[in-house]
Amino acid sequence: MLDFLLEPLSFGFIRNSMIMIILLGILCSVTGSFLIVQKMGFLGEVIAHAVLPGLAIAFYIGIDIFLGAFISGMLSSLIIAWIQSQSRVKVDVAMSLVFSGFFALGILLITLLKSRIDLHSFLFGDILGVTSYDLWRTFFITISVIIFVKLFYPHLLFYTFNPLGAQAIGLPVAWINLGLVSAITLTIIASMQAVGVVLVVSLLVGPSISAYLLVKELHQMMFLGGLLGGISGVIGIYISYYWNVPSGASIVLVVTILFLLSFLFSPSEGILTRPQVLSQPHKLIKFLVKK
């Protein structure tokens, strides 16, 4: 058993990938918890696809592609907010439009600029290829986001659960929202290398939503979500190593399994552990038969 656990760790790229996924588990949990509580999980998907035009332009002019991705992701969020504030269009419709528009623009720019961006790596990630520079960048992003949340937690908490009340008492809700969007964008950019755009939202909200079913407080949700995210990542990398399957997909599948376990067996929210189900199991049978 000890050899089973230690053998992958003899490779430097495996050690780097495990450090990276633990950092991402913490980072995604902190920002993903706010998305879940605000019922804005689709925003992560939008930003993840909206970074493609920024990547293409940054690659073409020779600057850091992550800077281009950050600017593009922030721009997409500002456009969504602008459409929502200036029209009767609902936020989910605005997000869908920006999602498709930015992604199409990115594909077009890659073709026109003859950019050599590795789309396969962009879409599906390559956590086994992380470098020391990637680790340090993710570390500083994680620390920066945690410090931001720690310093402004009371304001963030109030705004998250009661944005109208926060505005009424004079909190700078525009700046709070900008800070949250910036943190979410940075999280997505850091996570893209691990699991790619296609799967990034699963890592962003999966561990947090599992924690949401297990605890009641937002800070507990962040802590437990970070723990579940790190565990999912490490298990996923072991599965990838021993079964020779894509690491990003393995990580996301473990995240999904942990959510299903929480969904079924959560002490207070689980489908199979609710008091009425335990005391009257025939109701569960009838419910399943109807389905």
Image (cartoon, grey):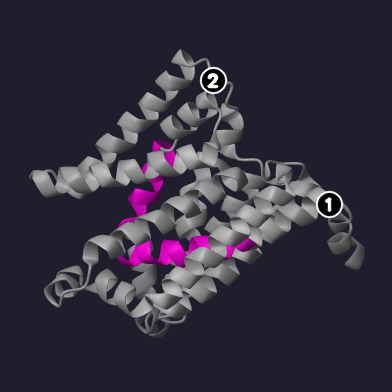
Q: CA distance from mark 2 to mark 1?
A: 31 Å
Depth check, front residue: 265 or 155: 155
Q: Position of residue 205 (x, y in %)?
A: 45, 58
Q: Secondary structure at mark 1?
A: helix
The x and y percentages for residue 25 are 57, 62
Q: Count residues near mark 1 (Cα–Cα under 10 Å), then give few for <14, some for 14-19, many for 20+.
A: few
Quadrant in the picture for the N terminus: bottom right
Question: In the image, what residue type sits under mark 2?
Answer: Ser
Q: Which residue is mark 2?
A: 115
Q: Main secondary structure of the magenta part?
A: helix
Q: Magenta includes 49? A: yes
Three-letter residue code for mark 1: Gly
Q: Residue 209's spot in the image, x, y percent?
A: 44, 65
**250 inside magenta stretch:** no
Drawn side of residue 220 relative to residue 254, left or right: left
- Residue at image point 46% right, 37% down: 68
Write down the region rendered in magenta: 23-50
Rendered image quadrant of residue 274? bottom left
Q: Residue at x 66, y 49 (%)?
A: 134
Q: Is residue 82 left or right of residue 270?
A: left
Under tag 2, what secondary structure? loop
Residue holding disc 1: 12
Identified at 53% across, 74% down, the residue is 224
Residue in the picture at 75% in, 54% down: 16
Residue 84 coordinates in the image, percent (x, y): 16, 47
Q: Is residue 39 visible?
A: no
